[in-house]
């Protein structure tokens, strides 16, 4: 059964308007339940539509958590395989978007494992986005650089990676992936109040990283 | 748009450039293309034969389809009904056979008003006269290993309930039944379990000094004084 990959975009847009209200069970959820049942019954090909549908999201979350495309690719791939191997234990309990939140939970946990592993081995992350203090701040003396969307995006990516992981994960899920608080609650298993506080603090951290540092402007050039 | 989320790019004119939302900028990071080979690599690994796992095999659901005509449904229903009836009958007959055989560990609830809903204190028997059964031979008809028998008597408001019979020489002071409690569903339900030798026995309940035949006993035997004792066959 084939699914359009871009369906996930429409899905996420609807979540954005849902806020914290519980979304309704949809034909999409029903279809995913059927695909999972087929997988559990021994038809691995039924997993393909789920991979196609959620590969962007899984990869993007891992990338924003880790900053490395190769690490993100490994995490996304292994997360799908973990999910497939655990499908017989998956229970949607009638919750809408149960599979996507369950998959994202695996992705986030695997990403955290990689971060811990890198920290433990004192191996710096091989980030493919620009890093370093200088790129976090705008350079007012260089309007061409500011005008460049690519430059600004790299600044944002680097700043996001400088935010501590427990704040970064909520920023990635809430502001980048546009999940509802209810979905993030399921992914991270944290109370919604805690999530809201973390989002506010994480945005403040990010904002501080992006604003110019007085007295360091000369160094930024 | 939430103004808390807004930032102004440095160097931008307040009047000429629109305020940029931090959230909007973050949302733009969502546009990431996954590696083209990701799905293919996942599916290659997923489709690869996995080592046999007995646990997984046992948990694997079995999918099958059954198509039945209306006639078939009727036939299946009939077979199931007949089968269920036969099972119930078989269970009942084996239970009765078990009671008749009187296995050593069988607890046979042979007596008891509690089994009869709505029964409260049974009507009092006249007088406290001597029981005819006391003069009868105490022993049962057969000898053998004792059988555990549970005596139950529902007597709301009674202070003492005992059981006496040929198995204890009609001594109403020995086998006292215990009250189920002061309130709750077991209140007023007196119970005791006694090891009774195999054979046929006569017995009576003694409720606050009054001798009362078991209202649920299936058999009774005249006591020779114009009344009847309850009969227990083991």
Image (tube, helix red, strand yellow):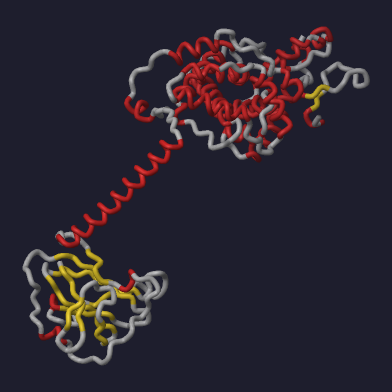
- Which residue is rendered at x = 33% and y = 20% of the image? B52
Q: Is residue A85 shown above or below A23?
A: above
Q: Is residue A18 shown above or below B113?
A: above
Q: Is residue B50 shown above or below A37?
A: above
| Residue occupying the far right of the picture | B15
Left or right of A127 on screen, residue A207: right
Can I make out residue A105 in this image?
no
Quarter residue B188 falls in: bottom left
- Which residue is rendered at x = 61% and y = 27% of the image? A28
Q: Where in the figure is residue B61, as x and y percent of width and height?
A: 41, 29
Quarter residue B89 falls in: bottom left
Camera-side residue of B137 and B44: B137
Camera-side residue of A39 and B21: A39
Q: Where in the figure is residue A34, as x and y percent of width and height?
A: 53, 27
Left or right of B214 on screen, residue B7: right
Q: Where in the figure is residue B98, as x and y percent of width and height?
A: 19, 58
Quarter residue A41 falls in: top left
Which quadrant is the N terminus of chain A positioned in?
A: top right
Left or right of A83 on screen, residue A61: right
Q: Where in the figure is residue B184, as x and y percent of width and height?
A: 42, 70
Which quadrant is the C terminus of chain A positioned in?
A: top right
Left or right of A5 on screen, residue A141: right
- Which residue is rendered at x = 11% and y = 67% of the image? B198
């Amino acid at each position: 059964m084939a699914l359009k990959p871009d369906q996930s975009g429409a899905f996420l847009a609807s979540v954005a308007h849902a806020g914290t209200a519980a979304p309704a069970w949809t034909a999409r959820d029903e279809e995913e339940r059927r695909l999972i049942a087929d997988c559990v019954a021994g038809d691995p090909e039924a997993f393909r539509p789920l991979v196609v549908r959620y590969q962007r999201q899984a990869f993007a979350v891992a990338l924003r958590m880790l900053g490395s495309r190769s690490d993100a690719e490994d995490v996304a791939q292994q997360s799908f395989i973990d999910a497939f191997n655990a499908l017989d234990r998956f229970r949607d309990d009638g919750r809408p978007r149960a599979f996507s939140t369950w998959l994202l939970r695996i992705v986030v946990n695997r990403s955290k494992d990689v971060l811990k592993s890198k920290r433990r081995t004192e191996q710096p992350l091989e980030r493919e986005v620009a890093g370093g203090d200088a790129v976090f701040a705008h350079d007012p003396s260089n309007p061409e650089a500011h005008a460049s969307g690519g430059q600004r995006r790299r600044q944002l990516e680097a700043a996001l990676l400088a935010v501590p992981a427990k704040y970064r994960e909520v920023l990635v899920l809430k502001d980048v992936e546009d999940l509802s608080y209810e979905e993030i609650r399921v992914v991270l298993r944290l109370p919604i109040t805690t999530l809201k506080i973390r989002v506010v603090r994480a945005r403040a951290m990010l904002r501080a990283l992006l604003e110019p540092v007085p007295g360091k402007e000369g160094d930024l050039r | 748009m939430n103004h808390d989320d807004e930032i102004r790019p440095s160097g931008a004119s307040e009047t000429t450039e629109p305020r940029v939302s931090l959230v909007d900028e973050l949302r733009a990071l969502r546009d990431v293309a996954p590696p083209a080979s990701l799905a293919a690599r996942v599916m290659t690994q997923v489709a690869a034969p996995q080592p046999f796992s007995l646990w997984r095999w046992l948990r694997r659901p079995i999918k099958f389809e059954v198509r039945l005509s209306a006639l078939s449904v009727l036939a299946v229903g009939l077979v199931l009904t007949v089968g269920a009836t036969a099972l119930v009958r078989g269970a009942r007959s084996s239970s009765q056979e078990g009671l008749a055989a009187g296995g050593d560990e069988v607890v046979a609830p042979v007596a008891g008003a509690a089994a009869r809903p709505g029964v409260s204190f049974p009507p009092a028997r006249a007088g406290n006269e001597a029981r005819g059964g006391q003069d009868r031979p105490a022993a049962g008809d057969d000898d053998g290993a004792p059988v555990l028998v549970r005596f139950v008597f529902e007597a709301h408001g009674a202070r003492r309930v005992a059981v006496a019979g040929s198995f204890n020489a009609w001594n109403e002071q020995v086998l006292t039944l215990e009250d189920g409690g002061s309130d709750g569903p077991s209140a007023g339900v007196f119970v005791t379990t006694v090891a009774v030798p195999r054979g046929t026995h006569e017995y009576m309940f003694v409720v606050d000094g009054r001798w009362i035949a078991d209202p649920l006993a299936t058999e009774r035997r005249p006591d020779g004084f114009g009344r009847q004792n309850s009969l227990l066959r083991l």
